[in-house]
Amino acid sequence: AKALTLECVRQALVEDRPCCILAFSGPGQVEELEITSLEQEGAWAELLDFLGHSFGGGTDIDATVERCLQLMRDDVWQNADMLLVTDGMIAPLDTAMVEELQLRTSEWGLRVHGVLIELENTYDSMIGRADRNEEAI
């Protein structure tokens, strides 16, 4: 999830688009980093340090989506896309939040993208394939 986020930030900055990253986990665990350029002194270190943070677990998406919507009310972020990258399953959003997302999609052209990186099943699947390949040799 962090590698994908790093590449999305890099690509956005190549296109001269600022980024705001919100790292999230359980209730009340949301951290934010705004990046406008990686050319500024210390920008890479700050980004890598931010991506190096981890939480104790849980996946509460509501506060993160609400913060994204707050940011998008600012002119700087009006044309931004929302990309949610998670390594955990998320619960359905609150109905009011879904309605606001739908409104923003129709009014602002907001595009919401999501990527679920499921580590446990991926690992089990890879080990299973490796075991089968080893038996074939």
Image: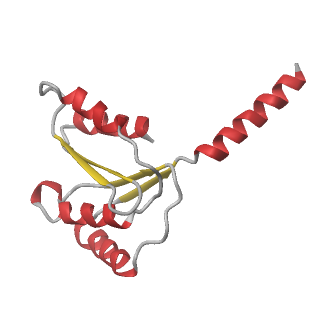
Q: Position of residue 48 (x, y in %)?
A: 30, 31
Q: Position of residue 122 (x, y in %)?
A: 64, 42
Question: Measured along the vertical axis of the image, is residue 75 above or below residue 17?
Answer: below
Question: Measured along the vertical axis of the image, is residue 106 above or below residue 127?
Answer: below
- Locate the N terminus and report the quarter of the image it occupies: top left
Q: Position of residue 66 (x, y in %)?
A: 28, 67
Question: Measured along the vertical axis of the image, is residue 102 above or below residue 132?
Answer: below
How many callouts does the rendering have? 0
Pick the residue in front: 125 or 112: 125
Quarter holding residue 51: top left
Quarter holding residue 103: bottom left
Pick the residue in front: 2 or 109: 2
Residue at screen point 47% across, 51% down: 115
Q: Position of residue 34 (x, y in %)?
A: 19, 45
Residue at screen point 12% across, 61% down: 74
Pick the residue in front: 18 or 34: 34
Q: How is the image coloured?
A: secondary structure
In the visual, does 107 lie left or right of 6? left
- Locate the C terminus and report the quarter of the image it occupies: top right
Residue at screen point 50% across, 49% down: 87
Outermost residue to the right: 136
Question: Measured along the vertical axis of the image, is residue 41 above or below residue 31?
Answer: above
Outermost residue to the top: 137
